[in-house]
Image (spheres, rainbow, N blue to C red):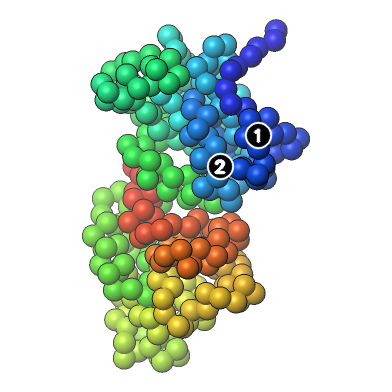
Amino acid sequence: MRREFNGLGFLSSSNHVNTLFIPQVKLPVQARGGPLSLVSQSGAFLVTRLSCFSQLPMRYAVSIGNQIDVRLSDFVSALGQDPETRVIATYVEGFMPGDLLATALAARKAIQSGKWVVLYKGGRSAEGQKAASSHTGALAGDWELQKALLKRAGVLVCESMGTYDSALAWLAAFPAGKPSRVAVVTNAGYESVVSADLLVGAVAGHILDPGEVAQVKALLEAHKLQELVNPRLPLDVTPMADEEAYLACCRLALGTAADTVVVGLVPLTMRLDTTDPARMEAFARSLLALARESGKRLGVVVEGGPLFEAYRQTFMRAGLPLFLSMEKALLGLGLLAEV
């Protein structure tokens, strides 16, 4: 039976198909393959995600419009059976009659097979529902009841676009397992303070045991940082730390019971090279290698202005999750830990 949908189009990495109605001069992207597939009721949401996060390892990306024939649950079900898709990300403004339950059941089946299903819903307020009905013809509903059903099925429901984007950044790079204990290494005192405030609840900050404290002290002495740095987590290595010091600290942190390391790089220090592409790429590849060797998550935060966009892109090209603030990185982890 032939089935149709009236969305903006789709990308497929498996056969290099791009049917999006956006010229390449405006959106020069292709799905490059990976564990993430994105299903969006809004075409604009889809293309802005592809534009802003072009380095995401996307397997499929599809806009489903007002679901005149094929519905959200159909896509979730199909992707749940796709062995290459490990993260199903969705943006929805409303469910067609009967499709909320069908979507929840399809999501639960996918989650039980080891996948993640992530959802952001537009049109949660009365005014938002009016806007959604005029945009995609989405049907209004009681969001609290819808959310309860979806969460019971195991769906990762995001309450803000910021946490949605952060969760996808983490999951696209590291789709296996859930975070629970985090080590932060940064060169900024305020990032260490902010992270200490946020590492509570389901995801906590790792506390060094006496043996690990001794290792940190020896490492700091080797890099002549012992007079500047307190040997505790979150670890503030100060602006005097260079790439080698960072790598040594990350290697040590990944060797502890922490399952995730977040690296804060405020790039205005002269000790970090943010101009030489070869050195930047070597640093990014080394961080990724440490994560892969340990089998743990490692994400990078670069808080700096437009001057450092090339620096940020280097880590994204390497396949590391990249965040614009420590808060966004840690809130994303916190959301993953709560499911």
Write down the quadrant of residue 145 in the picture.
top left
Instruction: Residue type at mark 1: give it.
Output: Leu
Quarter of the C terminus within the rendering? top left
Query: Residue at the right extreme?
Result: 15
Question: What residue appears at the point 60 percent right and 61 percent down from the top-left corner?
Answer: 318
Write down the quadrant of residue 29 in the picture.
top right
* Residue 223, above or below 29: below
Closer to the camera in the image, 253 or 210: 253
Task: State the image coordinates of residue 95 (x, y, percent, origin top left).
Answer: 42, 17
Question: What residue appears at the point 62 percent right and 35 percent down from the top-left corner?
Answer: 22
Please tell me whether mark 1 sits on a helix, a strand or a loop: strand
Write down the quadrant of residue 234 in the picture.
bottom left
Q: Are marks 1 and 2 in contact (CB under 8 Å)?
A: yes
Tell me if I can see residue 30 in this picture.
yes
Location of mark 1 (residue): 11
Location of mark 2 (residue): 50
Closer to the camera in the image, 91 or 117: 91
